[in-house]
Image (cartoon, grey):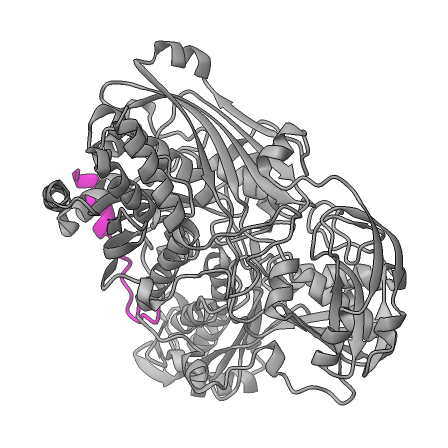
Amino acid sequence: MNSKTEAFLTQQVPMAWAEVGKSQKHESAVLHVLGEATYTDDIAEAQGTLHAALGLSSKAHANILSMDLEPVRRMPGVVAVYTHTDIPGTNDCGPIIHDDPILSPGLVQYIGQPIFIVVAKTHEQARRAARKAVIEYEELPAILTPQAARDAQSFVVPPMHLARGDAQAAFERSTHRLKGELQVGGQEQFYLEGQIAYAVPKEGDGMHVYCSTQHPTEMQHVVAHALHRHSHDIVVECRRMGGAFGGKESQSALWAACAAISAARLKRPVKLRADRDDDMMVTGKRHCFWYEYEIGYGDDGRITAAKVQMVSRAGFSADLSAPVATRAVCHFDNTYYLGDVDIRAMCGKTNTQSNTAFRGFGGPQGAIAIEYIVDEIARNLGMDALDVRKINFYGRNDEEGRNVTQYGQKIVDNVIHELVEQLVSESDYRKRRDEINAFNATSPVLKRGLALTPVKFGIAFNVTHFNQAGALVHVYTDGSVLVNHGGTEMGQGINTKVCQVVAHELGIPLDMVRASATNTSKVANTSATAASTGADLNGKAAQDAAHTIRKRLAEFAVKLHGGAVEDVRFEAGQIIVNGSAVPFPELVQKAYMARVQLWSDGFYATPGLHWDPKTMSGNPFSYYAYGASVSEVVVDTLTGEWKLLKVNALYDAGQSLNPALDVGQVEGAFVQGMGWLTTEELWWNASGKLMTHAPSTYKIPGVSDCPENFDIRLFKNRNVTDSIHRSKAVGEPPLLLPFSVFLAIRDACSSVANHKFNPPLRAPATSEAILNAISAVQELAQG
């Protein structure tokens, strides 16, 4: 580590009063434990509340020839049945391209597509009635896989292409070349609280929609358009979600719209709560990807040319597939400098659920490919994969010009070298590698595997104008504070962090600050809580609002006690002014009597961002978060069963706002990412029906899948970018850490033939996939 880097890593901001940087419990932790936290389904139902359910398509691609809904209407408790002709406004819930109908207008494009709404007196009555429709279809050819979509040139948006240098010429100069394919599956968000919306009509054709959503403003827009009303007629509110992971960014719109349409027509409150099976059948998932790649490299393992074609399963509509693919293209490099590259991405239109946002938003799908490739290079050269990774790392500062990404952004905060070296030392990587080799040499059935993988993840929305946020801070005359911001709480702790920021700015204890529900009538035109920007954007906006109040109070304190405004300190619930310590509530009360404004709005827009989608170049990210992990597994080569034995991970959260929350986020992201790559297999049958649509058929990881030794630590760092208190995002980047689990399994599989061949392991690495990879290696070894 050079002296400049060491000084940077150890630099800290002096804080006389610090409510940030502390490990504080989640603001709703006690409510969660006691079962008192209010989710959308817990809201007391207004008198006359009805319940809705959706009638779904049973065909993957077909025209509806006829539809008899009389059997539905005759079912007990049914009040009304609505189709697309009953929507007074726009029949669309697509977030970018308007190709996603709320209710099918006659063409169904996947099994599970909503066709009609049933409203009944009870939830169960609505669900039973929805299954009684008699529908006659004219079936059409269906496209079900990314490969089939590519072959048919069936895309939801035009293909993307990013090129730098001359990849073809670089290939010709390369000492070695390899070609290959990789298949990586999708993933169900599997939030514990399913999709739900509760629409309550208000006076003057108003509508109040309580919705489990990451994007209240988008819900406001969709509902307003569907009801043919202005945005000011619609209020969308979300106190908290029981998980979201991207699945409630755009796809909560369908449920909000259907509840609101029904409520508007009946002039009665309507709740639409999705059953888990219906939820999984209707909603999109993480995009599965299929890759074809060609790589040039030298004897030392350094990549000299790279070409990759990625095809994702977009589903039947565009949804967020374009920005997901863009982020995948921008994260293909991960932590590696790629000089001459040719990257192509296609969003295949398939007759399946329209895939959507999922934690990582294309970043994991982009980076997993290069990690798989580096793993192959190492095996081909007989090298340790860690050494191949290190030689390909982006340079420090301007080292040989190796610090500019393929899309043209200069990396000014590269700490991956120091972070990986620290992890190698703390995890005893080299020693464990030798021990595992010795174990495998004497163990014919059980094989151990080890892998260390790094992470570099860009923080910001791909779309520049989404990088903005607003907040309101109210100081009451007793000194207590209420903050409202545009972010949504889904368990990640955004409200806790924002409250910490406000408490710190005003120099008061954290328990004096409370966050209220996200509400479109308070902070307008908000961005989704996504792209790992929630605390960054809303924390800055809340800080701006609190700082304005602080400045007013400081000026007022100087009027009362003398001194200079710049010398006034806010700490420990007091204002220190000209040698006097005045309790915060006392000064606030006096300020109110003197008619000093005790509330303020705040706003923040991330500076320095720009992106040209035509050339796929620019400065799309505010900064990068880094990390690395070491995973050790044992694989039973006869059954394909495996176990994760140990994990060591180091994550760069910058100057953490709340270390306890951040470590928890890393742990959760690691297990979720491990599930994506190992157990969570989505499977559609030949007719296009999703067969893994319930917990009985879809396996998410459980407590027993966590390793006994799970060592997660935060890397000591300070963001070079002026983020909120120099912290870094922690929502999505850690999901890439469990690449090490997948590649440790691959390492164990390759040990069957003494690491002479590359196992063709697909993700998720289920027991079946592991056995297939082992069989392929054994066949290669036998010649």
Does 584 appear above or below 695? below
- Identify which residue is drawn at 21% across, 32% down: 387
Left/right placement of residue 316 relative to residue 291 reads right
Q: Main secondary structure of the magenta part?
A: loop
Range of residues picked out in magenta: 1-22
* Quarter of the picture holding the N terminus: top left
Left/right placement of residue 203 relative to residue 377 reads right
Q: Between 383 and 460, which is closer to the camera in this rendering? A: 383
- Identify which residue is drawn at 30% across, 78% down: 579
- Does residue 342 show up magenta in the picture? no
* Quarter of the picture holding the C terminus: top left
Does 610 appear above or below 398? below
Residue 411 visible to an observer of this rendering: no
When asked about the image quadrant of residue 777, the answer is top left
- Identify which residue is drawn at 38% across, 26% down: 338
| Residue 49 image point, x, y percent | 76, 84
Q: Between 646 and 475, which is closer to the camera in this rendering? A: 646
- Identify which residue is drawn at 79% across, 87% down: 48
| Residue 457 image point, x, y percent | 41, 44
